[in-house]
Amino acid sequence: MRANGFWAGLMLCVLGTGCSAEAGELAPDNGHDTEAAQSEEALSSNILTKKQASTVLDLIDDICGDSWCEGDHNFHFERIQCWRACSGERAGTCQVTFRIFPHDTDLDTGPTYVRTCKTLGFAGFSSLVDTAANGYQSLHWDYYDALSACISEVEDELPPS
């Protein structure tokens, strides 16, 4: 009888919350494929509220000017989605979808490249954003590091301009 309860709970977790383990199975090895990202989004629910997602994207965009956007490309951050993990091995997964385009063009005149960065080990808003007692918010250092590493990898894979 206990085994049936275990499997029922596991299925509820997989079907109800959109586990990151399941979402990860759909992603390609490099974690930057747009089609897989769209498939994941359709199959998984976001544990971030719309307001939380908007806050995270705004904070990413704010720090962009002092980090990734200092390079050869401009960025437009479009979406963030996070999933809980069903196992105790890691906290969860978050994925940011963004467009990259050369500094000498704009988003409308192209070329633009839609890419995603998947970061493992994040369990939702509080693992992405630090909120000070006075209400000031900033990206959590661990999330910033993980996202920076992924964005550097994505930039290295872009075709030469």
Image (cartoon, grey):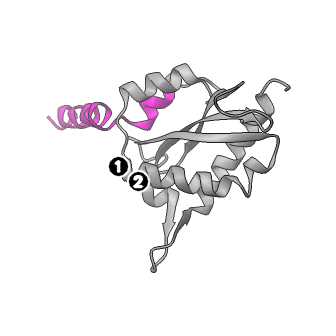
Instruction: Please identify the dominant SS of the magenta region.
Output: helix
Disc 2 to disc 1: CB gap under 8 Å: yes
Q: Vertical placement of 121 versus 76: above or below? A: below
Q: Is residue 10 left or right of residue 142?
A: left
In space, the residues marked 2 and 1 are separated at their CA atoms by 5 Å
- Check disc 1 and report its element: helix, strand or loop: loop
Q: Is residue 15 left or right of residue 53?
A: left
Q: Position of residue 49 (x, y in %)?
A: 35, 49
Of all residues, the one furthest to the top in this rendering is: 35
- At 38% from the left edge and 36% from the top edge, which residue is drawn? 19
Which residue type does callout 1 highlight?
Answer: Thr
Residue topped by disc 2: 52
Q: Position of residue 103 (x, y in %)?
A: 78, 39
Q: Position of residue 24 (x, y in %)?
A: 50, 30
Q: Vertical placement of 127 versus 134: above or below? A: above
- At 37% from the left edge and 47% from the top edge, which residue is drawn? 50
Q: Vertical placement of 139 versus 107: above or below? A: below
Quadrant (top left, top right, bottom left, bottom right) of the C terminus: top right
Magenta stretch, residue numbers? 1-25
Q: Is residue 116 left or right of residue 86?
A: right
- Check disc 2 and report its element: helix, strand or loop: helix
